[in-house]
Image (cartoon, rainbow, N blue to C red):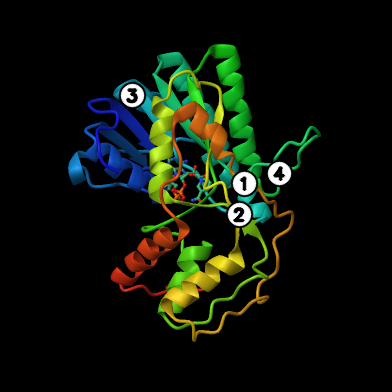
Amino acid sequence: MQGAYLEKQKVLVTGAAGFIGSHLCRTLLDGGAEVHGISRKAQLDSEGGMHWWQGDLANASIARDLIAAIQPDIIFHLASYVAGSRDLRLVWPTFESNLMSTVNLLTMASEIGCRRIVLTGSLEEAESNGGETVPSSPYAAAKGASSSYARMFHALYRTPVVTARLFMVYGPGQQDTNKLIPYVTLSLLGKQPPKLSSGLRQVDWIYVQDVVGGLIAAAQAPNIEGQTIDLGSGTLVSIQTIVQQLADRIDSRVELLWGALPERQMEQTRVANIKKTYDSTGWKPQTSLTTGLECTVDWYREQGGSLHKPN
Ligand SMILES: NC(=O)c1ccc[n+]([C@@H]2O[C@H](COP(=O)([O-])OP(=O)(O)OC[C@H]3O[C@@H](n4cnc5c(N)ncnc54)[C@H](OP(=O)(O)O)[C@@H]3O)[C@@H](O)[C@H]2O)c1
């Protein structure tokens, strides 16, 4: 992406050191915004003019002090404990890092005021088909509850919040090597057979730089407060197809261990409604799956790709 995005505006990015956050911060800095990032770990100021803050947003007084000190025009809330596992041990960290951090930021943004707060929802949130919904994981429950709070804050307090519902994001710089594309890419580059489930799940994959464009559109488009917009490709592609494309590109001689991992419980299939997103924001994805996978593989190859933590 090139151009002026939120030029000269004060922008707070939570989760700024993460996969999507770091791409977003680079684009905002290139576009001339004053970018503040928060991480729980100490980060070095100055890289490209970035202003770093340290703290845990699950702590209400830290969230309050942060918003009061920065007084941001725009908040992008990406901080999150991102994990799809159904493990009981994930209930508390996802509740704290996802739901409490979101409620804290929504409260402070309502009290202190800002022009727009963009939350990041997820394709994993349970889809309502009229009846009651059951989230498929602690992460999905926390994300669904966060979106519900967003709607309440907008309805009751006129908080200028927009939820960008992200589909399966991939691209250079994804640090979590348990995620499918980094795991399979690094396995194949290291000539290790990747362990896979059946691969039958159909997923809507979206390239990270397209997501960055969508988040910026969510911050800028007029009259969409209170709404949820989908950021996906609008197309379903199976895990089998993705893995096969990676194998064809990297090394088709490495065995693919289909069925070596169990299926996850309650896996859902959801596709982004990108027509609705385009109508309300003018955003649509630009990167084909072929180009996106090529850029991703090239990046891991340049890093000297190897898998430190096989599944
Ligand atoms: N990647 C995807 O496919 C996908 C799909 C749908 C939705 N999303 C959403 O998009 C957002 C960004 O995802 P990502 O893939 O970039 O995740 P990520 O790489 O794991 O980054 C998330 C960041 O959140 C920070 N964080 C977590 N808890 C925090 C807390 N309590 N206070 C302050 N910072 C905290 C972590 O930074 P520190 O460790 O530095 O504090 C981490 O770098 C998340 O909200 C995620 O749910 C992602």
What residue type is disc 4 on?
Pro
Q: Residue at x 53, y 13 (%)?
A: 158
Query: In terms of secondary structure, where does tag 1 sit?
Result: loop
Name which quarter of the figure residue 34 lies in: top left
What residue type is disc 3 on?
Pro
Q: Are marks 2 and 1 in contact (CB under 8 Å)?
A: yes
The reply, left or right, for residue 102 in relation to residue 22 is right
Q: CA distance from mark 3 to mark 1?
A: 33 Å
Residue receiving disc 2: 236
What residue type is disc 1 on?
Val
Label 2 crowd (10 A; few <14 / some 14-19 / many >=20): some
Q: Residue at x 70, y 69 (%)?
A: 262
Q: Are marks 2 and 4 in contact (CB under 8 Å)?
A: no
Residue receiving disc 4: 135
Query: In terms of secondary structure, where does tag 2 sit?
Result: loop
| Sequence-earlier tag: 2 or 4 | 4
Q: Are marks 4 and 1 in contact (CB under 8 Å)?
A: no
Label 4 crowd (10 A; few <14 / some 14-19 / many >=20): some
What's the mark number on residue 271? 1
What's the mark number on residue 72? 3
Query: In terms of secondary structure, where does tag 3 sit?
Result: loop
